[in-house]
Structure formats: C-alpha cells, structure tokens
Image (tube, grey):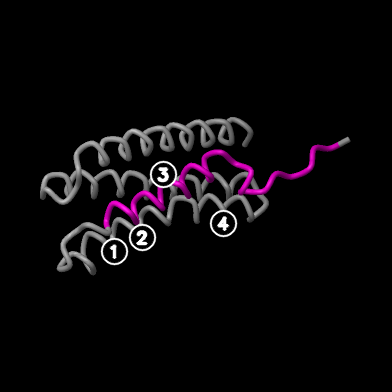
Amino acid sequence: MPRPERSYADLIVWQRSVSLSSKIYRLTNNFPKQEQFGLTNQMRRAAISIPSNIAEGRSRGTSRDFMNFLRIALGSAAELETQIIIADDLGFCDFEKSSEIKNELMEIRKMLHGMIRKLDSRT
C-alpha cells in the first residue's frame, strides 16, 4: 500500500522555520524605528520566505519543484544570516539572542541541505 503524502506542516524543517520567523519578529521589535522599512522589514521577509517556500514547494507535487523551492528557502536562510550579522554589527541585537537564532538557522540550513541531497539522489 502506498504511503500517504505528508503535508508541509508535518515537516520538522517547516515547523522550526515557522518558529524562527516568530523569533525574528520578536528580535526586530526592538530595532530602531528608522529601521522599520529597512533592516527590520528585510529580516522579517527573509525569515518568512523560508517556511513559505518549503510549503509552496511541497504543495507543488513533484520532487523537482520541491527541490527548487528548498533551494530558494536555503537562499533566504543565507540572506537572513547575513542580515543578522549586520544587525549585530550595528548593535541592534542582544548578542545572546542573535547567537541562539544563528545557531537555529544553521540547523535549519543543514536540514534543507539534507533534503535537497536526498531529493537530488532520486532524480
């Protein structure tokens, strides 16, 4: 009997990236007001892009499409990491919180790389 298709919401990488998005919103709440349409907005958009692309790719139905959207999510994760480093350099972040978020982001990136490798070996 074939396995039932898993929803994107069943994927741990999606769940963790949704949680990360919430942490980014809380982190950026304390950024200077003049950054509302700058770094704050960019970081929030990059964070939301990770689970959004996982969801969209998983919902497309083909491994090739899913793999492409996982790569986009991976790019958004790299973008977010860069933005966190910049926010740290500017003194916008509590170092302990930003370090925790960067570690979580690294784990998400590892998971995305693993999924891409697995899907790539199937095609």
Read off the residue under disc 3.
74
Q: Residue at x 43, y 31 (%)?
A: 110
Read off the residue under disc 4.
56
Q: Earlier in the sequence, mark 4 or mark 3?
A: 4
Whole-angstrom CA distance, mark 1 to mark 3, is 19 Å
> How many numbered markers are drawn?
4
Whole-angstrom CA distance, mark 1 to mark 2, is 6 Å
Local crowd size for mark 4, using a 10 Å CA cut-off: few (<14), some (14–19), many (≥20): some
SS under mark 1: helix
Read off the residue under disc 2.
45
Read off the residue under disc 1.
41
Q: Which one is in front in this view, the residue at disc 4 or the one at disc 2? A: 2
Height in image: 33 above or below 25? Answer: below
- Residue type of the residue flagged with mark 1: Asn
Height in image: 38 above or below 91? Answer: below
Image quadrant in which the C terminus is located: top right
- Tell me which segment is drawn in magenta: 2-28
- Residue type of the residue flagged with mark 3: Leu
SS under mark 2: helix
Task: Tell whether position 111 is magenta.
Answer: no
Q: Earlier in the sequence, mark 4 or mark 2?
A: 2
